[in-house]
Every structure is written in C-alpha cells, then in structure tokens.
Amino acid sequence: MAENTPIKPEALRRFVARALASQGVPSGDAAKVASLMVEADIYGYATHGVFRLRQYLARLAGGGCNPTPAVKVVHETVATAVIDGDDGLGHLAMSAARDLAMKKAREAGIGWVGVRRGNHAGPLALYVRPQAEAGLLGMAAAVGSANHVPPYGGSDVLLGTNPIAFSAPGDGTDPFVFDMATTVAAMGKIKTLLQQGDPMPEGWMVGRDGRPLTDPARKSEGFLLPIGGPKGFGLSVAIGLMAGVLNGAAFGSDVIDFTNDTASSTNTGQFVLALNPVAFGIADFGPRAERVFEEMRASEPLPGHAPVRLPGDGKTAMAKAREDRGLDLKPALWRDLEALRAEYEFEASFI
C-alpha cells in the first residue's frame, strides 16, 4: 500500500492490535487499546495516537509495561474510587476510570476516579468526550510521562507537561472538548517534528543558557516552557497533587521517563471526573450551554482573524470524514510502522 494512500481506520486498528498482541497483550485488550489509539488520530490528536506505538512496544518489550494487567478498584466510596492499573497499557486503566466515573455520576451526581500504576494513555480527550456525549460534564488530568519542565525560576526538571481536559454537552453537533498541556507545546508535538525533520518554533523550549531552542533533536538539552509563566507552573503543580500525590502515584523526582527507561514501572497518576448537571437541578444544561456557545461564535472577528470557534468545533464532522475516507498518515509515520512490523516480527497489513 502506497504511503500517500489514505488508510482505513479499521485496517489501522487491526495493525496496531496485532503489534500489541505480538508482545503478549491479550486480543481483547489489544483491540481496546488499538481502537482508542486510532480514535485519537481520527479526532485530530495525532501526536498522541498511533504515533506512540513505538514507545508502547518498547515498554512492553522492556518489561516496564505489563502486557496482562489485572486492572482493579483498590479503594471506593459512593462518589470516588482509585484504580490500580497494574503497570498495564494506560488506556485500559483510564477507560475503566472513565466508565466508573460516569456510572457514579449517574448514581451520585459526581464521580471522581483516580489511577495509580498507570501508563501513558493517549490524549485526555478520549476520557472526557464520552461524558459530554452522554449529557455529563467531564474532566481529566495526568502527571506527564517524563519531566521536561523546571519549577518557575528554577533549573531542575521536576515537572512534566501535566495535561488537563474538560468537556461539556451542548445542543449542537459538537460538544465542548478542551484538551491542553500546561506547557506551551506538548512533548509529543516536538517528537513528531523530530520524526518529520522539521524545526520547532521559538518559544516552545529554551536551553540551559536561557536562549530559544529550535532543533527538536536537542530537546534533551533544554526545558519546555509553561503556559503563562508562573500561572502555568502553579496549574501544573495543582494537577500533580490531584493526579499524582492524591492517588499514591509518582510526582516530582519520582517520575520515570517512559521513553528512555523502558524497564521501570512509571506509576503514572491520572484522574477522570464526571459531573451530572441534574444533581444541580439543571435538566437542560445542553440547550443553556449551546446558547452561550452560539453567542461566542457570533462574536464579530477582529480584523484578520477567522470566525470564533470553540474547543471541539468541527471534530464530529472531521472524525466521520476520516472514518469514511481514511486517515492520511505522515510519510515518516508510515515508514516507522513498516519498521515496527519488521522489528517486532508480526504479520499485519494496511488493507
């Protein structure tokens, strides 16, 4: 199959599932993780989708990721819980946390589920969009899978990109889905630029001399910059407390670089929240929110600016188009997938 030919998502799911199965992941778990990885690409989160397959296979092969985890609830109340991911693929623990949070929100009005001993799980949008589609509000956050950021004003890398995501239902085609790193750029974006041979924009990273760093191949020589300076730093610490310390998971110097260390448990910490508007006496949250969304979209654009869009706008149509037509993978990613098939010796095709 030629590099420039769109690949059908179902074929890509099969390919990823077989790759994971080659490292001992049971077929059901492999299919579930593959589906979520491809879903990330379908919704436009390419830096956290199939692009990450090489890292996941390396951790499975290296022993840092358990191919057959017993994901289980280790502490629970009516509205909260903690899930132990047993060092398995992060998507398994996070999807379990999302589903349990939604169940609790329907029963108790709110569900907050933390994860310990997890792993990288792709974009957080995967774990908040379903809440909005079900009429709930969602939130999720994670301690980054490697430290790339010093405390504001410091020089020791003790923080990761520590992402956070929110979702809310509307009354239109697209729910509100907002997924961001607490750094100016996610490390995944820098890794994709490196794979494609492209430079970084100024303002994403600085070297230890404080000067802009634009060569992604030199990313280990510098720091990622937090959004908003000290504000981004404070938000990152807050996420680390809620997703890491609160769950008995890694934060600060305990964080393992999941790319460079493929043998150690990362003890990645995450959480997923679901909130039921009915618990606040609001049975028509979607229409109320949509009215506000429409007001914002109708705001007169500044000269030279495109019309106002909200986070999540256009994602539903884009996802359907990609599901129907196929995904256009970057040539560098095509080549990497072909290389993985040879390296890990599994049979799979893109047809």
Image (cartoon, rainbow, N blue to C red):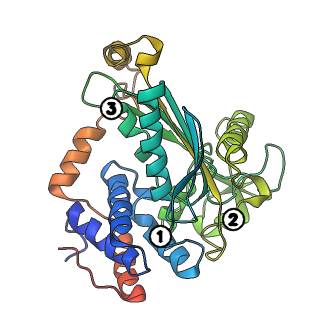
Residue for point 33% across, 66% down? 28
Q: Considering only vertical position in the picture, is 255 above or below 243?
A: below
Helix, strand or loop at mark 1: helix
Task: Identify the residue at image location x=44%, y=80%.
Answer: 23
Q: Nearer the viewer, residue 108 or 282?
A: 108
Task: Report, in whole angstroms, how far the alpha carbon at label 1 lies from the one at label 2.
Answer: 23 Å
Question: Sequence order check: which comes first, mark 1 or mark 3?
Answer: 3
Placement of 63 over or under 171, stated as above or below: below
Dots 1 and 2: beta carbons under 8 Å? no
Residue 296 found in image quarter: top left
- Residue under the image location 47 percent in, 14 percent down: 280
Secondary element under disc 2, as helix, strand or loop, is loop
Q: Which residue is mark 3?
A: 134
What percent of the width, then of the height, locates residue 176? Answer: 39, 30
Q: Amino acid at mark 1?
A: Gln
Query: Residue shown at 25%/46% (left/top)?
Result: 319
Q: Nearer the viewer, mark 2 or mark 3?
A: 3
Q: What's under tag 2, amino acid-wise?
A: Ile
Q: Nearer the viewer, mark 1 or mark 3?
A: 3
Q: Is residue 273 visible?
A: yes
Which quadrant of the figure contains the C terminus? Answer: bottom left
Q: Nearer the viewer, residue 61 or 76?
A: 76
Q: Which residue is mark 1?
A: 195
| Of callouts 2 and 3, the N-terminal one | 3
Q: Mark 1 to mark 3: distance in Å?
A: 37 Å
- Residue bearing the label numbered 2: 256
Amino acid type of disc 3?
Ala
Q: Position of residue 52 (x, y in %)?
A: 46, 65
Q: Position of residue 228 (x, y in %)?
A: 67, 35
